[in-house]
Image (spheres, rainbow, N blue to C red):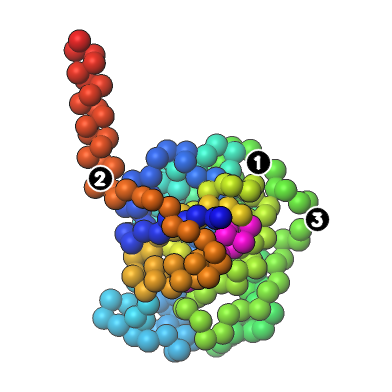
Amino acid sequence: MQTYQLHHLDAVNWLRGLPTESVDLIITDPPYESLEKHRKEGTTTRLKRSKASSNNWFEIFPNSRFPELFSEIWRVLKRNSHFYLFCDPETMFIAKPIAEAAGFRFWKPLIWDKMKIGMGYHYRARYECILFFEKGKRKINNLSISDIISFPRIHKGYPAEKPVEVSEILIQQSSSVGDIVLDPFMGSGSVGVAATRERRRFWGNDIHIEALRLTESRLRLEGAMAEKTKTLATSKKQKKKQNNTNHDVLDK
């Protein structure tokens, strides 16, 4: 049976509580800053507005926080692993150099072809980028896969929800059975569902409780079972206790 951990924290704070080099693969889709511009122009009017942001599902993760995010992603990823970042073309030019500064090697943008055009006032969007980064050196598992991944967009789902099939391809390419796949902005949990179907463990986080409820429901339907976890506060307390024990041993 496949297992999962779900957490309800700020993404960066959650990553800071994870052990160094503990994760095999990261796939994530932050609510990037440029979404605000599109909403103000009315291209995503289906999303409800709230005081915190332009909709009541998630708050925007600002570009100014990318350095701390990518630094923590680099730290928690094992050596010789991959990191995939969903983003729009505007965010790609901002995120790429920051991730490289954190230590990642950028290979190329993959293209998720949504197969139908979306809304817009100029050339109407039909695709989204998936930035492909590497820590160390790791080969993808199947060299015959194209850099254009075509699956229809999700209609009337969670805001910015991604098809499970897209994440399945990334997981198949960059991990092995039993590996840990992580998503710090899990939203509806499509990465988690894909990880479960591909017989990987899933560690997910989201700042909104609605995301946790939806993701857990989906994972249980897939037959996954929750792992026993310790809170961040408990982990810190135990670490402090361990450090004190080590000092006692040295004093002796």
Q: Is 197 situated above or below 244?
A: below
User: For this view, does 126 lie left or right of residue 236?
Assistant: right
Q: What residue type is labelled 1?
A: Arg
Point 56% across, 72% down: residue: 162
CA gap, disc 3 and disc 2: 46 Å
Say which element carries label 1.
loop
Point 58% across, 58% down: residue: 195
Magenta-drawn segment: 188-198
| Crowd band around label 1 with a 10 angstrom C-alpha radius: few (<14), some (14–19), many (20+) | few
Q: Does the magenta stretch include residue 192?
A: yes
Q: Nearer the viewer, mark 3 or mark 2?
A: 2
CA gap, disc 1 and disc 3: 16 Å
Q: Is 114 situated above or below 45?
A: above
Q: Which of marks 3 and 2 is nearer the N terminus?
A: 3
> Residue beneath label 2, please?
234
Note whether residue 62 is visible.
no
Q: Where is residue 115 in the image (x, y as percent from the top left)?
A: 69, 79
Residue found at the far top of this picture? 252
Point 70% across, 48% down: residue: 140
> Residue beneath label 3, please?
144
Q: Which amino acid does label 3 sit on?
A: Ser
> Residue beneath label 1, please?
138
| Crowd band around label 3 with a 10 angstrom C-alpha radius: few (<14), some (14–19), many (20+) | few
